[in-house]
Amino acid sequence: MKKIVLASGNAGKLREFSAMFAEHFADQAIEVIPQNQLNVTEAEENGLSFVENAILKARNAAQQTGLPALADDSGIEVDALNGAPGIYSARYAQRAGYQGDESGDAANNAMLLEALTAVAKEQRTARFQCVLVYMRYADDPTPQVFQGSWEGHIVLNPEGHEGFGYDPLFFVASEQCTAAELSKEHKNRISHRGVAMQKLMAGIKL
């Protein structure tokens, strides 16, 4: 059986990748193992782009396990903020010194709305980005990179209760609702991560 280490301990990501590898490589026995099961120390995400951070995470997991590694890095870019929060999406409020009562996703959303207070609706364009990296070994000189994006704009107030992160603020014109108002299954098909995963499955060289 071929084993691949996933540079994440996220159970949802593990289920998604395991299911996709099982479907697309039915003729091969592939097991995707989360890095926390292999006692991998998490990589320091000090890259300056989604690609750099995904490579750092994949290389770190491959170095510590000796297995091929798969990593992702994702976030949201807002044009009026020159691409912020970008690679700092998960810790946007923390980095910006947010002083409100919220924490976690709620604080990030509040910080983003605060930063866009004076920005007109038509100028609140944004996109989610996802970069997936597959490395055959730690010193792989040609990491395989797959990228997906999802266009939208930031609404004035959170809407919807599905999803996570910035989903309640991200309006998708084709669906006429926010990402947090989509079913999980539909979101996974059309989202940045869904597009990146489809590209990975179509082009990956194991």
Image (cartoon, rainbow, N blue to C red):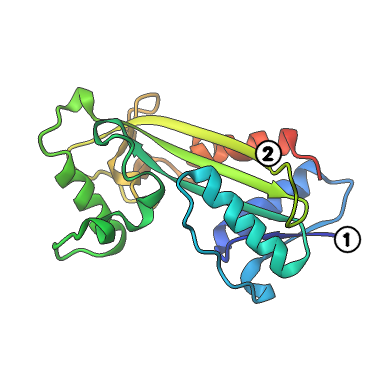
Type of the residue with mark 2: Leu
Mark 1 or mark 2, earlier in chain: 1
Type of the residue with mark 1: Met
Taking the spot 77% from the left edge, 41% from the top edge, the residue there is 24
Q: Residues within 10 Å of mark 1 (few under 14, many from 20)?
A: few
Q: Secondary structure at mark 1?
A: loop
> Residue 69, located in which quarter of the rendered image?
bottom right
How far across and how far down the image is residue 166, in percent? 33, 47
Residue linked to disc 2: 200
> Along the horizontal axis of the image, is 46 left or right of 88?
right
Q: Residues within 10 Å of mark 2 (few under 14, many from 20)?
A: many
How far across and how far down the image is residue 60, in percent? 64, 62
Q: Residue furthest bottom?
A: 39
Looking at this view, is 141 or 199 the one in front? 141
Taking the spot 54% from the left edge, 34% from the top edge, the residue there is 148
Taking the spot 57% from the left edge, 66% from the top edge, the residue there is 9
How far across and how far down the image is residue 204, in percent? 75, 39
How far across and how far down the image is residue 78, in percent? 30, 35
Residue linked to disc 1: 1
Observer able to see residue 185: no
